[in-house]
Image: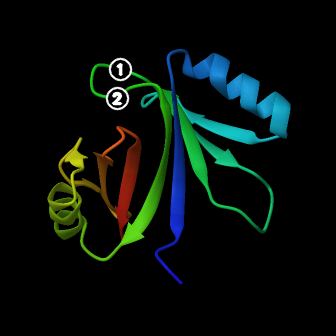
Amino acid sequence: MGKPVAWFDITAKDAAKSRSFYSEIFGWKIDVDPQMNYGMIDTAASEGIPGGIGEAGEHSAAGIVLYIVVEDAEATLKQVESLGGERETLPYDIPGIGIMAVFRDPDGNRVGLWQR
């Protein structure tokens, strides 16, 4: 089996509207951190992957990103670049949780990396 998906992000132009939209459609309970304007999604299910909905901004475009578990985000970004992709962010630490990074594949799709 390959590397699993660990997280998903929905980044929206209007995060509050997007949170309301997805909550209404899927019955998601969303706990919003007002300082970050980011909502953690509680799907109340034992299956599936966790995720969140945040606000698009200067450094984050609207869209959906799946974060895939890797052992070494920096090494994976180097491999991405060698295969024709581009890093969008440098690896960054989420204190006490892990390291994240985002790249674009050769078709321009945004994909996230999650290093535990």
Quadrant into which the C terminus falls: bottom left
The residue at the far bottom in this view is: 1
Given residues 41 and 80, the one toward you in this image is 80
Residue occupied by mark 2:
60
Q: Residue at x 52, y 64 (%)?
A: 6
Kind of element beneath mark 1:
loop
Q: Name the amino acid, label 2.
A: Ser
- Spot occupied by residue 13 in the image (x, y as percentages of width and height): 50, 16
Q: Is residue 96 left or right of residue 34?
A: left
Kind of element beneath mark 2:
loop
Whether residue 31 is visible, yes or no, is yes
Q: Name the amino acid, label 1.
A: Gly
Q: Is residue 59 above or below residue 26?
A: above
Q: Is residue 10 above or below residue 101?
A: above
Q: Is residue 31 left or right of residue 43?
A: left
Q: Which mark is residue 57?
A: 1
Q: Which mark is residue 33?
A: none
Q: Is residue 14 above or below residue 87?
A: above
- Spot occupied by residue 34 in the image (x, y as percentages of width and height): 50, 27
Quadrant into which the N terminus falls: bottom right
Q: Is residue 18 left or right of residue 28?
A: left
Q: Are marks 2 and 1 in contact (CB under 8 Å)?
A: yes
Q: Residue at x 38, y 52 (%)?
A: 112
Q: Is residue 66 left or right of residue 79?
A: right
Q: Residue at x 77, y 41 (%)?
A: 28
